[in-house]
Image: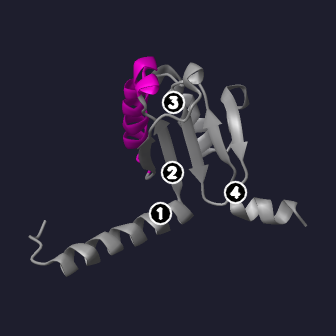
Amino acid sequence: MAQLKSLEELQQMCQEMKQAEQVRRETSTVITVGMGTCGIAAGARETLQAIEEELNRRQIDALVVTAGCIGVCVREPLVDIQQAGRSRIVYANVHPAMVPRLIEEHVIKGQPVKEWVVGRMPSDESALYSSR
């Protein structure tokens, strides 16, 4: 990485990174793992690692991010999957052994694993169509 020589260069780099992340969020898959202390205690680190390994193994380009406590500690580890133009799905009690099925069915085939779903938030686009 080139050395930054001014505050303006840093600001420009930050702006470019924000724009790249926004494009990625609008056109691909974002997987969020709850990593508050409650999630970590429930095994979220291992779940996060399993997700990253499964995506790498299958050569799937998805943005994996972490979040703090979501407030549903009893259901940790929580995993949220958002695919462009589709409803955002939250899964509960996701442990490493569940990850291959989750990636196969939801990320690859676009079919949520219904028995693990604890929340669904419509995408902005689908909310627009459902209100008509």
Residue type at mark 4 is: Ser
Label 1 vs 2, first from the N-terminus: 1
- Magenta highlight on residue 56: yes
**Cβ–Cβ under 8 Å for marks 1 and 2:** yes
Which quarter shows the N terminus? bottom left
Residue type at mark 1 is: Arg
Measure how far apart labels 1 and 2 are at the Cα level.
8 Å
- Magenta highlight on residue 64: no
Residue 115 placement, left or right of 41: right
Residue at position x 43%, y 35% from top? 51
Q: Which residue is mark 2?
A: 30
Residue at position x 41%, y 19% from top? 41
Give the crowd class for mark 2: few <14, some 14-19, many >=20 residues within 10 Å.
Answer: many
Q: Which residue is mark 1?
A: 24
Residue 72 placement, left or right of 47: right
Label 3 vs 4, first from the N-terminus: 3
Residue at position x 21%, y 73% from top? 10
Q: Which residue is mark 4?
A: 123
Colouring of the image: one colour
Q: Secondary structure at mark 2?
A: strand
